[in-house]
């Protein structure tokens, strides 16, 4: 993870001051003393978000992502490190601003709607300083924004889970916070609703022009919602990047294994006609970019050996290919089958094949490699 510059004090080549990040988390450490000793929850967590960006902390239970969100909100005091919101320092080793003074809105995992208040009163809860007419106008504006313009008089128990989530979002957005924080926003919803609602939520946040940070363990939610995603492991970020780069250009085996499906085949780097290539069982793969080439050489053993990542969409079904693989497992996914294939060497890989190619277990099919990036790792790097 590269160190993050203090953007609120940086200047461009012209001497103009660069505007501060909407959210800057720098070197955050959080630990607790337990009967068994010190428990490190966050270990030097660092990332930043620009105005209007949607970020996500992605990782399994226990990786520290929810603690990080609570630290940004002001519910947890860091042991060390800094948090800046819109250029204002809200937490360091000497100072920790109260949650209500940070300008953050929070959508909790269980939505935390007040059951005795109707929808309009829930949304208006943080607007008590406004005059009644202005408060009603803002409530109507927020319910319109989240697509629920006519339910102000209903109560939370009368709403579906998706509607409750939208009301909680409207309530968090109503005071116009600088940052919106979302804790596992879809965990209480049916799986078939999550991706659609994630796209709806992204549209709402973009229309509101608000910077947002969510935490989730679900990569599909992260990819549907976020501009930047940080894959977390043991209290730190392994890679903070776009969803595309996390999937196609993971920097560590841990990221490669956590984000998407994939297989690893042994390979060897060599040169052909002055260009670097990696030879694997599927053939010789060209390394197109200088960055990938430099990384592959840095990762290779003295004999040039590496591990090569193959995503299921990198492996193409091709009846004309001389390379044949045996179907050992298949999973129907609507438009595609996910095949587990065994190569002549005994190595296995995954392939996404259009579902009109319905091959039986034990059948041998032709395959070839087709990808823009050759992603390699050291042969001794653990998963």
Image: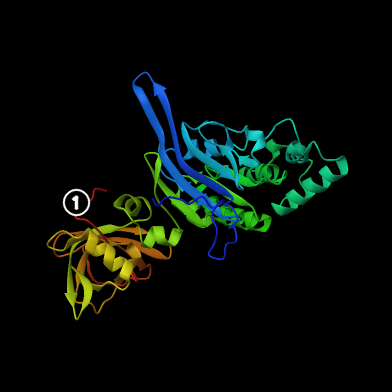
* Colour theme: rainbow
Q: Residue furthest top?
A: 35
Relative to 333, is 381 on the left or the right? left
Q: Position of residue 321 (x, y in %)?
A: 23, 77
Quarter holding residue 18: bottom right
Q: Nearer the viewer, residue 183 or 32?
A: 32
Q: Position of residue 166 (x, y in %)?
A: 66, 46
Residue at image position (45%, 58%) is: 243
- The residue that mark 1 highlights is 380
Q: Residue furthest front?
A: 15
Q: Is residue 107 above or below residue 222?
A: above
Q: Nearer the viewer, residue 183 or 6?
A: 6
Q: Is residue 328 visible?
A: no
Residue at image position (40%, 52%) is: 2
Relative to 16, is 264 on the left or the right? left
Q: Position of residue 117 (x, y in %)?
A: 75, 33
Q: Is residue 93 visible?
A: yes
Relative to 116, is 336 on the left or the right? left
Q: Residues within 10 Å of mark 1 (few under 14, many from 20)?
A: few
Q: How many marks?
A: 1
Q: Position of residue 324 (x, y in %)?
A: 20, 70
Q: Is residue 100 above or below residue 50?
A: above
Element assignment for label 1: loop
Quarter holding residue 89: top right
Q: Is residue 354 above or below residue 4?
A: below
């Amino acid at each position: 993870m590269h160190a993050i510059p203090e953007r609120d004090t940086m200047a461009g080549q012209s001497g103009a001051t660069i505007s501060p990040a909407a959210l800057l988390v720098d070197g955050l450490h959080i630990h607790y003393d337990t009967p068994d000793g010190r428990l490190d929850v966050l270990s030097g967590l660092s990332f930043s978000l620009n105005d209007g960006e949607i970020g996500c902390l992605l990782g399994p239970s226990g990786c520290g992502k929810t603690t990080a969100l609570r630290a940004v909100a002001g519910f947890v005091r860091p042991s060390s490190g800094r948090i800046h919101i819109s250029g204002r320092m809200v937490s360091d080793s000497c100072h920790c601003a109260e949650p209500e003074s940070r300008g953050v809105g929070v959508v909790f995992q269980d939505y935390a709607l007040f059951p005795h208040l109707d929808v309009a009163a829930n949304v208006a809860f943080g607007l008590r300083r406004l005059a009644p007419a202005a408060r009603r106008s803002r409530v109507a504006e927020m319910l319109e924004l989240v697509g629920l313009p006519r339910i102000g008089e209903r109560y939370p128990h009368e709403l579906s889970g998706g509607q409750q989530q939208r009301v909680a979002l409207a309530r968090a957005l109503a005071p116009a916070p600088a940052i919106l924080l979302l804790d596992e926003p879809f965990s209480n919803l049916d799986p078939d609703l999550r991706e659609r609602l994630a796209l709806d939520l992204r549209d709402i946040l973009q229309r509101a022009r608000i910077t947002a940070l969510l935490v989730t363990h679900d990569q599909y939610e992260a990819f549907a919602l976020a501009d930047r995603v940080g894959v977390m492991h043991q209290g730190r970020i392994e890679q903070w990047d776009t969803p595309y780069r996390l999937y196609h250009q993971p920097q560590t085996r841990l990221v490669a294994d956590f984000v998407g499906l994939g297989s690893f085949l042994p390979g060897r780097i060599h040169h052909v006609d002055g260009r670097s290539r990696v030879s694997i069982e599927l053939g010789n793969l060209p390394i197109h970019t200088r960055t990938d080439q430099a990384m592959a050489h840095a990762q290779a053993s003295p004999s040039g050996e590496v591990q090569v990542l193959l995503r299921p969409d990198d492996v193409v079904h091709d009846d004309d290919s001389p390379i044949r693989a045996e179907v050992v497992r298949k999973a129907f996914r609507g438009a595609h089958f996910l095949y587990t294939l065994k190569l002549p060497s005994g190595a296995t890989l995954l392939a996404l094949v259009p579902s009109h190619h319905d091959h039986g277990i034990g059948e041998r099919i032709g395959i070839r490699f087709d990808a823009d990036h050759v992603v390699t790792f050291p042969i001794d790097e653990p998963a």
